[in-house]
Amino acid sequence: MFRSLVCLHSALDGAFFWEQRAVAIARLVHWQLRTTSLYSFRRSIHRIEKGLATRPRREVFAADYIGETVAFLGLLAEAYEEGCTEYREDIAWGATALRAYFAAVKGEDRVEHAREAFQRLALPAGLVANGGEGGVVRPKMPEYGFGIADLLHLARTRHSIRDYLDRPVPRDVIDAAISVAIESPSACNRQAFSFRVFDEPDLVREVAKIPIGIDHADHQIPVLVVLVGNLGAYPEPRDRHLIYIDVSLAAMAFVFGLQVQGVASCCVNWPDIHEREKRMQELLGLASTERPVMLVTAGYLDPEGFAPSSAKRSLEEMRVYNRTVAGGSAHRAGDRVRTP
Ligand SMILES: Cc1cc2nc3c(=O)[nH]c(=O)nc-3n(C[C@H](O)[C@H](O)[C@H](O)COP(=O)(O)O)c2cc1C
């Protein structure tokens, strides 16, 4: 009964329309049409690298998807030869991992077929490094030139800024901050999102009208970024929340990347409203599986302006160690409703 009511509500309300449609399309493409996408290729390469890094290493792994992974690398290499150079990192990463895989894994029919196909591939010269183990790294914990106090200082001096100077932000500054964001963790390293950057005033104004939260749109916004996630990367409904997590992690890194370069910013909510989603999709030419997740405004702060102080909650209020509902020494009545 309750379930039917929920279904009826979501059907009438339409709030989940885009998400459901996008997940359905992704499912159809992946499981019905059995098409490998760039994102499932990246996921497969990630799983292969994990297999290579696992100790002790299994003798054979990835046999059930190695064939389609090699085939997709071939498609990427063809696209590269035809001028789609944006896939260069995917090709270099994938080919390096596959070379390491075939050096490490042998003996299974599906692996041997895939090995032959891999050897036949014409990979772009100069993109794929020869030699070296590849596929895995031995991470070192570097000595950073800054410590936790500096990081805390950065976090505490960042504020959401809604008053900017009428001064353009150089694109290399934006790009450097995006480069930081690109290094963020993402589910299976799929990186199923993009930064749609607007720094042309008329376009900024047009895009800024679509979300609800830019009531400071009358003020100057030098840069407006729409962070777009691609639900098509996740064919399983259980993973439909991952774009929001991936984008949020990248957004925070982006904001810090701006801040250390002297550029202020403000996150802007993306409301899940069908009509607005449609407007944004049409304006930006988004694919049917792509959704805005949030926006970020950026610019040089007006030193005469104000911002909310936005006090943060205390460490004691927000952090709990080893507490379970069943008890334990730290359990107190009422904690369940107050648990952050
Ligand atoms: C998901 C999200 C949505 C937000 N949406 C808006 C918004 O629509 N308009 C706005 O002015 N600020 C928005 N903010 C900024 C918050 O109001 C701000 O982060 C919060 O009040 C804390 O202030 P601080 O960022 O200065 O620490 C948003 C922040 C987040 C993380």
Image (spheres, grey):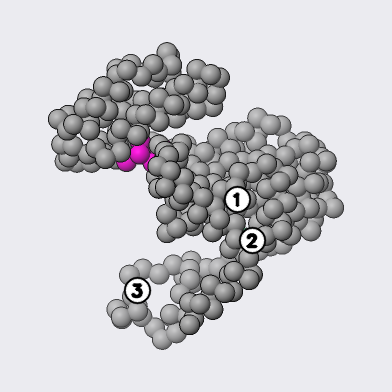
In the image, is residue 251 above or below residue 71? below
| Amino acid residing under circle 2 | Asp
* Quadrant where ligand 1 appears: bottom right
Question: Residues under labels 2 and 3: Cα distance?
Answer: 34 Å
At 58% from the left and 70% from the top, the residue drawn is 10
Residue marked by disc 1 = 291
Mark 3 burial class by Cα count in 10 Å: few <14, some 14-19, many 20+ = some
Task: Answer left or right for 270 relative to 316.
Answer: right
Question: Residues under labels 1 and 2: Cα distance?
Answer: 10 Å
In the image, is residue 298 above or below residue 9? above
Counting the numbered discs, the total is: 3
State which quadrant residue 307 falls in: bottom right
User: The residue tagged with tag 2: helix, strand or loop?
Assistant: loop
At 73% from the left and 51% from the top, the residue drawn is 279
Task: Give the numbered dot on residue 272.
Answer: 2
| Amino acid residing under circle 3 | Arg
Question: Residues under labels 3 and 1: Cα distance?
Answer: 37 Å
Estimate the x, y position of residue 93 in percent, counting from the top left.
39, 29
State which quadrant residue 324 falls in: bottom left
